[in-house]
Amino acid sequence: MNIFELIGHIFMNSMIPIFILIGVGFILDRKFKLDLYTLSKLNFYILLPTFVFRAMYEAKFTSSTLEIVFCALVVLILNSILSGVVGKIQGYDVAKIATLKNCVMFNNVGNMGIALAIFVFTNVPYIIDGATPYADLGLVSVVSIMIIQTITSNTYGFYQAGAGRLSTRDALNVVFHMPMVY
């Protein structure tokens, strides 16, 4: 299989299903006028904490997983430093630098990364003799990164979002009301 066939296969079997799910969500919203506030609360307070807990419970962590966690933390810290330097060079105030840091540091690996890892690692060329040996490792990798992103964005990210707007006490109060902290 050449590189163009591989890219085409991954696009057709990984990206198209994700776009179909997005399209279904769009159509459902058009037809039923979904309440995004309620869906967000359901996702934030029930689905995401449940998924993270289950993923951590079922994951088979190895030394490779620790390397992934270490790299994810290093990338997070470097993104914070880099965005802080760029914000200072641009002359941003404290609140704008905090917003820039949050935009650069935190990605949305939970919504797209997990689906993409499942779609990619359960298709050719990752199927070997009918088995998917890379699927578990891919999923553990993405879940590890998602856990780090979720915990840091719901703690440090919320604290940082209050920088320049809230007192330290009020910002910490916001952080300790986040379900992901617990």
Image (spheres, rainbow, N blue to C red):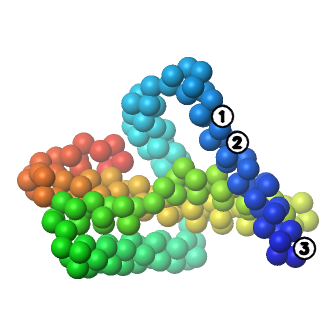
Amino acid at the residue labelled 2: Ile
Q: Which residue is mark 3?
A: 1
Residue density around tag 1, few if under 14, some if 14–19, many if 20 or more, within 10 Å: few
Instruction: Determine whether the residue tagged by mark 1 lies in a helix, strand or loop.
Output: helix
Q: CA distance from mark 1 to mark 3?
A: 32 Å
The reply to whether callout 2 and callout 3 are in contact (CB within 8 Å) is no
Q: What type is the residue that disc 1 sits on?
A: Val
Q: Position of residue 77 (x, y in %)?
A: 34, 75
> Residue type at mark 3?
Met
Q: Quadrant of residue 150?
A: bottom left
The local secondary structure at tag 2 comes to helix
Judged from this view, the residue extending furthest toward the top is 32
- Residue position marked by numbered label 1 in the rendering: 24
Which element type, helix, strand or loop, lies under badge 3?
loop
Pointers 2 and 1 in contact (C-beta within 8 Å) = yes
Read off the residue under disc 2: 20
Residue 60, x across and y down, in percent: 60, 63
Q: Horizontal and vertical percent for residue 104? A: 38, 66
Does the rendering let one see residue 57?
no
